[in-house]
């Protein structure tokens, strides 16, 4: 099939600090191309020096769409340029020989552009939200939920990455009949237990977290929990690059928490690192901790599991499905530093359990979350919506 990926604010091209959605779109597109599909990823041009089209790999091309100024814009300013993005797509699909059979939009703003363009050309749309506005309400305002509800009803299919996300979509008014759950995948060729690891003190257990430095990710709770894990160090990878970390408000807040609880000498904020460096950081750790208060889906636990790490997580969102409690890791209540600290201490001190969890985690990542499996499942979704549209068109003509 000819598949258009609409990812206006997350280009799959390698950058200095590659986010989860960027990695998702890049890996999914590559896996779909490996399955024989022809994929084009449409993303907003944010640099005047970018070529119009870049080949990402065999069967995958990235198309830079001129919509708004050719520079990086804050997320809150992207919505006003989606009309131009949609108009460019519509013109492109009508005026060239490459017309997609299905469009898959990633994030809600991409969905608005995709639906607007595809509706005029007769192309079915599949929508992935990646993260619902409920979790970002403080930043995006109340209007985002309305857009997401309308999108969920307008597209041909909504793909949720977990049952928890599917329930959240139903709660905001998306019909359950339009929902399909397909988990994210992990690149098990890049994220492996074998390979170089970041430097560490071999005498000090390393606990790792990965993600943006936002309060609801629960990094502050982990810092408090370190009181109950004497001798271990806590390393956080994510946020702005190391040079900008000192001025970052969230980094300052986390350092203040570490000072208050007298664990500052065992807490290290690394900042954002290039995506290619992430396997080294996972391999350097003894376990990963993911302690969000609310979440739809986290890639870091999957990547850690593929590197042979056990995961301690809070029992929220997609973590309830990624982590098998008592088999690949342990789940604890959210916002409970004492319970979190107890779980961390037990696992740090039990090498046999860590090895058993790590072995099961590696097997689960490879078997249940392979990109080949994900691409096959989404290929079936695409074929279904494209076939339904074709059938409807045939009936109308008849």
Image (cartoon, rainbow, N blue to C red):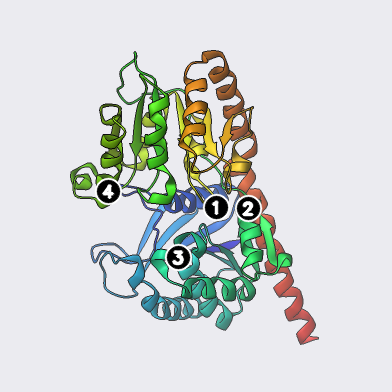
Q: In the drawing, what numbered circle is on residue 137? A: 3
Q: Residue at x 73, y 71 (%)?
A: 388
Asked whether, in this view, residue 171 is left or right of residue 243, the answer is right
| Separation of marks 2 and 1 at Cα, in angstroms | 7 Å
Horizontal side of 117 relative to 380 (left or right) equals left
| Residue 386, quarter of picture | bottom right
Q: Quadrant of residue 194?
A: top left
Q: Point out the tag, 2 or 4, that comes first from the N-terminus.
A: 2
> Residue 330: x percent and y percent?
58, 31
What percent of the width, then of the height, locates residue 209? Answer: 41, 36
**Residue 166: percent from left, percent from top:** 65, 58
Q: Is residue 280 left or right of residue 38?
A: left
SS for dot 1: loop
Residue occupying the point 60% across, 40% down: 322
Give the residue pinned by disc 2: 164
Q: Secondary structure at mark 3?
A: helix
88 up-or-down from 215: above or below: below
Judging by the rendered image, the residue that carries numbered circle 4 is 240
Earlier in the chain: of badge 3 and badge 1, it is 3
Q: Secondary structure at mark 4?
A: loop
Compare residues 194 and 1 and report the one nearer the observer: 194
CA–CA distance in space, label 2 to label 4: 29 Å
Q: Nearer the viewer, mark 3 or mark 1?
A: 3
Of the two numbered discs 4 and 3 on the same chain, state the one appearing first in sequence.
Answer: 3
Question: What whole-number distance in Å separates the C-alpha atoms at marks 4 and 1?
Answer: 22 Å
């Amino acid at each position: 099939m000819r598949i258009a990926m609409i990812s206006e604010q997350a280009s799959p091209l390698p950058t200095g600090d590659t986010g989860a959605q960027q990695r998702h779109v890049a890996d999914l597109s590559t896996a779909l191309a490996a399955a024989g599909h022809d994929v084009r990823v449409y993303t907003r041009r944010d640099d005047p020096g970018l070529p119009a089209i870049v080949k990402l790999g065999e069967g995958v091309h990235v198309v830079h769409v001129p919509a708004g100024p050719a520079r990086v814009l804050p997320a809150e300013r992207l919505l006003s340029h989606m009309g131009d993005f949609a108009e460019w797509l519509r013109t492109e699909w009508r005026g060239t020989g490459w017309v997609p059979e299905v469009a898959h939009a990633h994030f809600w703003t991409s969905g608005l552009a995709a639906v607007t363009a595809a509706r005029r050309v007769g192309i079915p749309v599949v929508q992935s939200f990646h993260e619902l506005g409920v979790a970002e309400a403080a930043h995006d305002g109340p209007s985002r939920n309305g857009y997401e509800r309308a999108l969920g009803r307008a597209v041909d299919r909504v793909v949720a990455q977990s049952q928890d996300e599917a329930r959240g979509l139903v709660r905001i008014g998306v019909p359950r009949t339009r929902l399909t759950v397909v988990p994210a995948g992990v690149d098990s060729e890049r994220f492996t237990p074998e390979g170089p690891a970041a430097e560490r003190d071999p005498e000090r257990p390393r606990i790792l977290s990965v993600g943006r430095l936002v309060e609801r990710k629960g990094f502050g709770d982990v810092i408090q929990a370190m009181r109950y894990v004497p001798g271990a160090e806590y390393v956080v990878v994510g946020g702005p690059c190391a040079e900008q970390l000192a001025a970052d408000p969230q980094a300052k807040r986390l350092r203040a928490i570490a000072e208050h609880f007298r664990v500052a000498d065992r807490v290290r904020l690394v900042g954002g690192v290039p995506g290619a460096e992430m396997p080294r950081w996972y391999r350097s750790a003894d376990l990963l901790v993911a302690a969000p208060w609310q979440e739809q889906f986290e890639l870091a636990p999957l990547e850690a599991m593929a590197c042979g790490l056990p995961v301690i997580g809070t029992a929220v969102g997609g973590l309830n499905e990624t982590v098998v409690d008592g088999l690949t890791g342990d789940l604890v209540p959210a916002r409970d530093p004492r319970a979190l600290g107890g779980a961390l201490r037990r696992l740090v001190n039990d090498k046999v359990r860590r090895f058993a969890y790590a072995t099961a985690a590696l097997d689960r990542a490879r078997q249940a979350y392979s990109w080949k499996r994900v691409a096959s499942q989404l290929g079936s979704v695409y074929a279904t919506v494209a076939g339904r549209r074709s059938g409807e068109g045939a009936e109308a003509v008849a």
